[in-house]
Amino acid sequence: MIEFDWDALVRALPFLAQGMVLTLELTGLAMVGGIALGTVLAILRLSMPAPVPQIIAGYVNGLRAMPLILVIFWFYLLVPLFLGRPVGAFSSALIAFTMFEAAYYSEIIRAGIQGVPRGQLQAALASGMSYPQAMRYIVLPQAFRAMVPILLTQSIILFQDTSLVYVVGLRDFLTAANIVASRDQRPIEMYLFVAAVYLVLCASASFGVRILQRKSAR
Amino acid sequence: MNYNWNWGILFREPFLGFLISGVQTTLVLALTAWVLAFTLGSVLGVMRTLPNRGVSAVAAVYVEVFRGIPLLVWFFLWFFVVPELLPQTWGRWLKRDLPDPEFWTAVAALGLYTACRVAEQVRAGIQAIPRGQTMAAEASGMNRVQVYRYILLPLGYRRIVPVLTSEFMTIFKNSSLALTIGVMELTAQARQVESFTFQGFEAFTAATVLYVVITLTVTVIMRQVEQRTRIPGLLSAKGT
Amino acid sequence: MIEIDQIDKWYGAHQVLKSCSTAVAKGEVVVVCGPSGSGKSTLIKAVNGLEPIQGGRITVAGEVVGSTNLSRLRARIGMVFQSFELYPHRTVLDNVALAQMVVLKRSRADAVAKADGLLTRVGMIDHRMKFPGQLSGGQQQRVAIARALAMDPIAMLFDEPTSALDPEMINEVLDVMTELALEGMTMMVVTHEMGFARRVAHRVVFMDEGAIVEDRAKDAFFDHPDTDRARAFLSKILHH
């Protein structure tokens, strides 16, 4: 039988915790940025004349056709090229995740806006509101209320997806564990621990989303 | 932007060969994993709809566990951890005697993970069928197996063709994670071209175009499936 | 033929059937009526075990409706639903032939011959290759009756067969049912069609709040209802 060496895990905990901080930072920032950019994309796509909606559709569908790893590689290559100076892996990963997730968020938000009965927008416009006002005060609040559970579920996926920064050597939770695993030759303990932590966090988060969903369904 | 363009590099050997073999590996990996995911996912999805609580709970736990852990972690678990936890002879077989262990590990990781997503769709598809259909089938004397075989599965699958399409596309994209355990699929080959030539822009463009082509092909094929399975008189499989 | 003996059913704390007893003799047509929510649909679905009961017992042709013989019993009792419940992914012909083949194990040729005969009888033979979604409600319900008859039932159950129909289609369905009754089919019919009841029924069962309030010969029920509740129900349904 294999002998587990949990001491190695305990010793590695501070290092792993640093990794988790990076994972959470990346998730939080990409979520805020992705939802903001996604909202803008969705509204422009629904309200602007051609060719703006077509361009946005191309952006969204293009990104959705690509594997996230490839997107991460792309931005790792492109961002320094565009800025003309080297940037850290964190910045390029953050930009990659924000742009990538925005494509997914924008589809959710677009569906949410379209789910608000058209009469609501017309009523708001009829009362003299401008289009942005009608969006801001009438349509978006209703749309977001219905979308919150889906946006949160997408954010749990984002949280899991950030583990892919492993490919550019950024020290997130998984990469930190990977470093310890090969340094101490304890892959079993490390990866089981990582899996358990992810499972507990994601399962409780999706449990929370389900409760929220049930509440808002009432 | 200082960059020396050289698109010709893509069509020169050995780099063209790299990309072609990358596409092949991506296709074979994703399709093999899809067969596993679709089969197991269907079984799990049906289990979730059975009245037996124990059977349904087993499937629910599977879905919860697989969905709660990132796919990349699954790749590492299947590659680094599982062979160690198995009896020694099995572990040795996995690591030494199995031809192409990285590829088969990737199939397992990708297929078993995607199965939980397919399972959720199959469950939703079956549960969305009005209860009267089951009642009508039962009232004519069909047993449970017949009700699933003739009524619930044909209707349920039709209903979920659009979401299965998107899961099917996702498995091609997700197969790129196999590069982390050394499978030389499309993204890995593009990266290899980059590291040999420093022409990253061209290499990644080629990979992107190839992925878009794969996605479009899947869309076209699945649209055919949707057309073929469309029920006359119903507006769409999504409606009632 | 059908004996219902003091059956009880609860949904949680709410009792939907309160010690209901009645019987349908061979060749008899019994109409069950009552305000909505009175439990009449639940009662008729209990006869072939689609709604499980918690107390009392039901026998059909001398056999107790239980869990072991359900499939065999159901194959011998035809049922027609309020919302038709034709299988949308199967043609009209297949809808009538399917259970014959998979439950009664008839050959395809026999099943089709039987189906064609019945479709002719209900006036739907010209539509045999159409799908349910391409038919009107009245046409669908006639196919559903043919589907139930294809199993050579010893009795037929009708659960509000005309409630989901537009007024102009109600008669085409009632005509088929009247013809069946005149041929001596044993029938239990939940319906609000009092004209049909007056013409065809032998007995009327009136239910309210889960209990059978009156169970009497047709003329007695219509001419001198015993209870205020039945009188109120009749006046509401006859003069509006």
Image: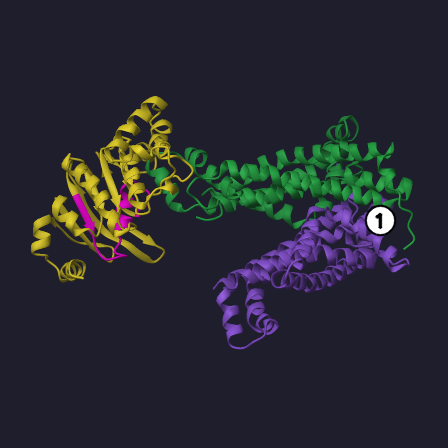
Q: Residue B94: x percent and y percent?
A: 75, 30
Q: Residue at x 15, y 36 (%)?
A: C27
The colour scheme used to paint the residues is: by chain
Left or right: where A40 falls relative to B80 = left
Q: Residue B205: x percent and y percent?
A: 79, 45
Q: Is residue A9 above or below residue C125?
A: below
Q: Colour of chain C?
A: yellow
Q: Residue under circle 1?
A: A179
Q: Magenta region: which residues?
A: C30-54
B97 or B229: nearer the viewer: B229
Q: Is residue B81 above or below residue C216?
A: above
In the orientation shown, which residue stands out farthest toward the front?
Answer: A50
Q: Residue at x 25, y 35 (%)?
A: C123
User: Disc 1 marks which amino acid?
Assistant: Ile
Crowd band around label 1 with a 10 angstrom C-alpha radius: few (<14), some (14–19), many (20+): some
- Chain assignment, label 1: A
B172 or C120: nearer the viewer: C120
